[in-house]
Image: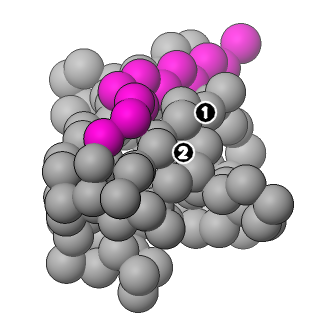
Amino acid sequence: QVQLVESGGGTVQSGDSLRLSCGASSLTFRSYVMGWFRQAPGKEREFVARINWDGTITYYTDSVNGRFTISRDNAKNTVYLQMNSLKPEDTAVYYCAAKRASANQFQYWGQGTLVTVSE
């Protein structure tokens, strides 16, 4: 069965950086669009970023554009989220997700990794 496993979360201070990783197994990784989502305490899950199969097309939500960078290594079946200039409002559980390019919705989800940004 498909597994997505996130890592790299932690507690940092405002202005710091973190890099999240998500390893995928049991899927043809290069056939999937990969995305990052987050859910802050008391809020609904929101889209953060996504990347196409070869990494040439990326999209970001406005609040992270210019600070976060999504990338992928198809040889390692891994997608990354480099987060710079972190703010307290970035505090959330971050989820990795995968979908086929033809799918409307992300089909597979990881268990999440917590990022906490203090003042």
The correct choice, above or below, for 11 with respect to 1 in the image is: below
Q: Residues within 10 Å of mark 2 (few under 14, many from 20)?
A: many
- Observer-nearest of 73 and 16: 16
| Residue drawn at point x = 73 percent, y = 45 percent | 107
Quick one: SS at disc 2? strand
| Residue drawn at point x = 35 percent, y = 59 percent | 119
| Residue drawn at point x = 25 percent, y = 32 percent | 74
Q: Can residue 12 be seen in this view?
A: yes
The correct choice, above or below, for 71 with respect to 105 in the image is: above
The amino acid beneath tag 1 is Gly
What are the residue bounds of the magenta stretch?
1-12
Q: Which of marks 2 and 1 is nearer the N terminus?
A: 2
Q: Residue 94 carries which label?
A: 2
Q: Magenta-highlighted stretch: main secondary structure?
A: strand
Residue 92 at x, y percent in the picture: 57, 51
Q: Residue 112 carries which label?
A: 1
Quadrant assignment, res 8? top left
Q: Is residue 57 visible?
A: no
Indicate whether residue 49 is drawn in magenta. no
Quick one: SS at disc 1? loop
Disc 2 to disc 1, how far (Cα)? 5 Å
Residue 76 at x, y percent in the picture: 24, 20
- Observer-nearest of 22 and 72: 22
Q: Do the residues labelled 2 and 1 touch (CB within 8 Å)?
A: yes
Left/right of residue 78 with respect to residue 102 in the rendered view: left
Residue 73 at x, y percent in the picture: 21, 34
- Observer-nearest of 41 and 55: 41
Indicate whether residue 11 is drawn in magenta. yes
